[in-house]
Image (cartoon, rainbow, N blue to C red):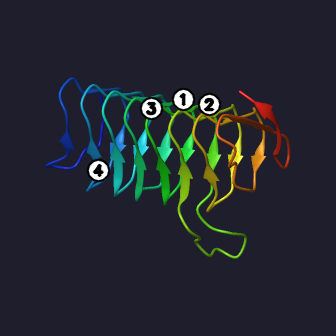
Amino acid sequence: MHNVIPYGFKYGENFEIGDFVKIEDDVIVGGNVTIGNYVLLKKGTRIGDNCFIDSYVRSSGDNVIGNNCTIRYGATIAKQVIIADNVFISPNVMTIYTDHNGVPSNPTYIADGAFIGTAAVLKNGITINRNVVIGAMSYVNMNCEIMGGIYVGQPVKYIGKR
């Protein structure tokens, strides 16, 4: 198994964990959560109930993943990212914590029911509204405010409703 898990790690019922997982102090995981192989959860990570955290996911800590969320293979969840309930994060999505000068901003917020496409990059401090779809390989450098909107491109632009 070769997992590194601190004494007193808090997790809910029906928690499943893969191999080669590192969990730091002050991480809390809800019930009915599955964590894949080679996952890193840094200090201050909070994961709600009924979540699937796929292999090779990395959490920089001090972030929140809500209930009924799926975080797919290789995604990186940066500090100060707040993911609401029922969100799907596709493989290799990257969230960013600081600007190009290394200065943190306001938290990044992904609202209920959002879908983030494969290999999208989310700039720090942005908000993605409810039920928004972000297209694969998009660069999100602005708030995606239209509820149920579809945003694609580099940088993203609004193209219509879901």
Q: Is residue 96 above or below residue 157?
A: below
65 left or right of 162 in image: left
Task: Say which residue appears at 51% left-offset and 34% top-offset.
Answer: 87
Say whether marks 1 and 3 touch (CB < 8 Å): no
Residue where numbered disc 4 is placed: 27
Which mark is first along the chain, 1 or 4?
Answer: 4
- Provide the secondary structure element on which disc 1 rests: loop
Residue located farthest toward the left when viewing the structure as drawn: 8
Which of the two discs, 4 and 3, sits closer to the camera? 3
Which mark is first along the chain, 2 or 4?
Answer: 4
Which of the two discs, 3 and 2, sits closer to the camera? 3
User: Horizontal and vertical percent for residue 142?
Assistant: 74, 56
Q: Quadrant of residue 146?
A: top right
Q: Is residue 143 above or below residue 91?
A: below
Quarter in which the C terminus is drawn: top right
Say whether marks 1 and 2 touch (CB < 8 Å): yes
Which mark is first along the chain, 2 or 1?
Answer: 1
User: Horizontal and vertical percent for residue 31?
Assistant: 24, 30
Residue where numbered disc 3 is placed: 69
Q: Give the Cα distance between marks 3 and 2.
A: 13 Å
Depth check: 141 or 41 in front? 141
Residue where numbered disc 2 is placed: 91
Say whether marks 4 and 2 touch (CB < 8 Å): no
Which mark is first along the chain, 3 or 4?
Answer: 4
Say what amino acid the circle numbered 1 marks.
Arg
* Label 3 crowd (10 A; few <14 / some 14-19 / many >=20): many
Q: Is residue 31 above or below residue 102?
A: above
Say what amino acid the circle numbered 4 marks.
Val
Depth check: 116 or 97 in front? 116
Q: Give the Cα distance between marks 4 and 2.
A: 22 Å
